[in-house]
Image (cartoon, helix red, strand yellow):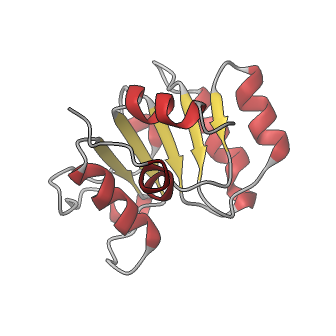
Amino acid sequence: MTDADIPRILSECRTIALVGWSAKPDRPSHAVAAFLAARGYRVIPVNPGLEGQVAPWGEAVRGNLAQVGAVDMVDVFRRSEDVGQVVDDVLAMEPRPRVLWLQLGVWDAASADRARASGLEVVEDRCTKIEIQRLGLPPLA
């Protein structure tokens, strides 16, 4: 993934399922989700332990990706060893998202390759918030 791909992805992907969202404000998943929501993205938090709660930006927390509906991107805040199951869940989604984004420190080459082979764009080991700030991308219109 190059710096030319990131702005395109972040401008085209307006609805994001954020897997591994935490209700704790000091957690990176919470801060990134709030940042994205404030920039105009629809961010759907996914966490089975928090299902039914409402995130600060007003979106209900879903228990799994099957409950999310149509999204452009799945942004993953899970351990690397959990990525295989997340990819299974993403590939079962209808319609299927276009992008799988694995946050900083999240790697699983085999699962990423499987997602790419199924037609998804995959971003690994990058943070959506950091990339938006680093590249100076404007909020969504």
Residue at image coords 67%, 55%: 125
Towards the viewer: 128 or 19: 128
Which percent across, then down, holds residue 126?
61, 54
Which percent across, then down, holds residue 130?
49, 59
List the single residue furthest toward the right.
110
Quarter where residue 86 is shown = top right
Image label count: 0
Towards the viewer: 91 or 127: 127
Q: Is residue 79 visible?
A: yes
List the single residue furthest toward the left.
58
Residue at image coords 43%, 76%: 27
Quadrant in the picture for the N terminus: top right
Horizontal side of 17 relative to 87 (left or right) equals left
Residue at image coords 36%, 67%: 30
**Does 20 sit above or below residue 4?**
below
List the single residue furthest toward the front.
136
**Does 23 sit above or below residue 107?**
below
List the single residue furthest toward the bottom.
26
Which percent across, then down, holds residue 58?
14, 53
Residue at image coords 54%, 37%: 6
**Does 113 sit above or below residue 50?**
above
Quarter where residue 15 is shown = top left
Q: Is residue 71 visible?
A: no
Quadrant in the picture for the C terminus: top left
Horizontal side of 129 relative to 34 (left or right) equals right
Horizontal side of 40 relative to 93 (left or right) equals left
**Does 141 sit above or below residue 53?**
above
